[in-house]
Image: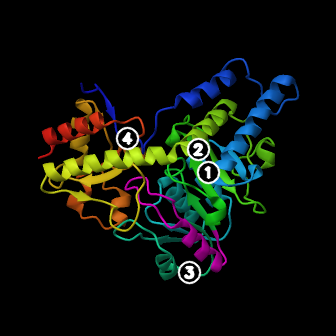
């Protein structure tokens, strides 16, 4: 029997996993101490924060003192860009946390160079080289795109940036917990992540800063995070984030296989049900597990979204952060999608808790509403 509700918008946010909630509860109730104080309540909280930092560092092959806790991916991205110096090169399909931070720096007189991805949604070192300008000291390219799910060759891009004498930052918000991340193998200098994208709580994230590098403070205040990020630590959320990332890393292969199977069922069902469909970001390499960005030309993406929602199926049209904006997605513009395609593109992103019955329900709803 069909569920009343099918959640297929995991790229926007994910459900809080039981392991994360269980880890958080003590620090929302009896273990409420401030980690910066000196009594026993504080020491317990401080130990929990330190242990969480160690867990997260292990998940990305970093050292614990290279992990700094933030309020989420947006703050992490802003800190990496605004805390660095010199010109910045960014891809044109970054999350707005990067693009708007870059635009803000540009208004202050900082040089910003924008690079378009390929039509398949990939940023290559060749594209960075073609757009390179003197004075660039930081390159920022996302690990995986949050609308079309394409995965970039981060190790290759970081190596290119370093050969040109620049540092390299990657927004791994959409990738963390879903594909392997190795900051040593990739040789990145900065990496951003956000817990709510991998079944952790909202409002917490982290920034990896390679040992020996320093960023200017984004927030002024106390001496938390070894003097680099002011503000009392969100202990419960930090602990929940660590638990969620650890669990997802342990189950990554199993989850990916499950999602690949569901995605194949979904795409096969779409291909056999509709004559005109266009997929974004599928031609030039791997995509994140569970991602399907598909256009039904002649249909309104916004209209489809609302009709699917009325039947209990949650998907998105473009990035969820722009849900009030009916203009064409900047990501689809960046990959030169035709207007007809862009205006009819929906994003279906599945998670580990989805089932074959969920896929069947999505297909039934699409067959009902797609013209």
* Magenta segment boundaries in residue numbering: 141-167
State the image coordinates of residue 21 (x, y, percent, origin top left). 58, 27
Question: In this image, 76 relative to 197: left or right?
Answer: right
The answer to whether the residue labelled 1 contacts the one labelled 2, judged by CB atoms less than 8 Å apart, is: yes
Viewer-nearest of discs 4 and 2 = 4
The answer to whether the residue labelled 3 contacts the one labelled 4, judged by CB atoms less than 8 Å apart, is: no
Q: From the image, tell me which residue sits under label 2.
A: 72
Q: From the image, tell me which residue sits under label 4.
A: 9
Image point 87% across, 25% down: which residue? 39
**First in residue order: circle 1 vs circle 4:** 4
Residue 38 occupies quadrant? top right
Image point 56% across, 41% down: which residue? 195
- The disc placed on residue 76 is 1
Tell me if residue 233 can be seen.
yes
Question: In this image, 28 relative to 355: left or right?
Answer: right
Image quarter where the N terminus lies is top left
**First in residue order: circle 2 vs circle 3:** 2
- The disc placed on residue 203 is none
């Amino acid at each position: 029997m069909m569920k009343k509700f099918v959640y297929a918008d995991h790229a926007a946010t994910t459900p809080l996993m039981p392991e994360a909630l269980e880890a958080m509860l003590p620090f929302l109730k009896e273990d409420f101490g401030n980690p910066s104080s000196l009594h026993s309540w504080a020491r317990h909280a401080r130990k929990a924060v330190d242990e969480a930092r160690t867990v997260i560092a292990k998940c990305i092959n970093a050292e614990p003192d290279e992990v700094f806790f933030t309020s989420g991916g947006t703050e992490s991205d802003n800190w990496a860009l605004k805390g660095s110096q010199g010109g910045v090169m960014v891809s044109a399909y970054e999350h707005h946390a990067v693009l708007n931070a870059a635009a803000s720096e540009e208004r202050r007189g900082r040089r910003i160079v924008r690079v378009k991805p390929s039509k398949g949604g990939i940023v290559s070192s060749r594209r960075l080289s073609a757009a390179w300008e003197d004075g660039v000291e930081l390159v920022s390219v996302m690990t995986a795109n949050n609308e079309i799910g394409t995965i970039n060759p981060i190790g290759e891009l970081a190596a290119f940036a370093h050969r040109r004498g620049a540092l390299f930052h990657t927004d791994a918000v959409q990738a963390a917990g879903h594909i392997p991340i190795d900051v040593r193998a990739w040789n990145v200098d900065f990496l951003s992540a956000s817990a709510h994208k991998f079944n952790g709580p909202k409002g917490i994230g982290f920034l990896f800063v390679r040992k020996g590098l320093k960023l200017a403070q984004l927030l002024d205040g106390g001496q938390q995070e070894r003097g680099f990020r002011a503000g009392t630590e969100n202990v419960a959320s930090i602990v929940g984030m660590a638990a969620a990332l650890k669990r997802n890393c342990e189950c990554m292969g199993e989850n990916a296989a499950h999602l690949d199977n569901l995605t194949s069922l979904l795409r096969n069902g779409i291909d056999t049900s509709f004559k005109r469909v266009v997929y974004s970001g599928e031609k030039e390499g791997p995509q994140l597990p569970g991602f399907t960005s598909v256009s039904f030309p002649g249909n309104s993406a916004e209209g489809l979204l609302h009709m699917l929602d009325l039947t209990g199926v949650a998907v998105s049209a473009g990035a969820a952060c722009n849900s009030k904006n009916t203009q064409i997605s900047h990501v689809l513009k960046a990959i030169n999608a035709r207007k007809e395609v862009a205006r009819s593109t929906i994003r279906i992103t599945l998670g580990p808790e989805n089932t074959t019955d969920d896929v069947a329900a999505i297909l039934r709803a699409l067959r009902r509403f797609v013209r």
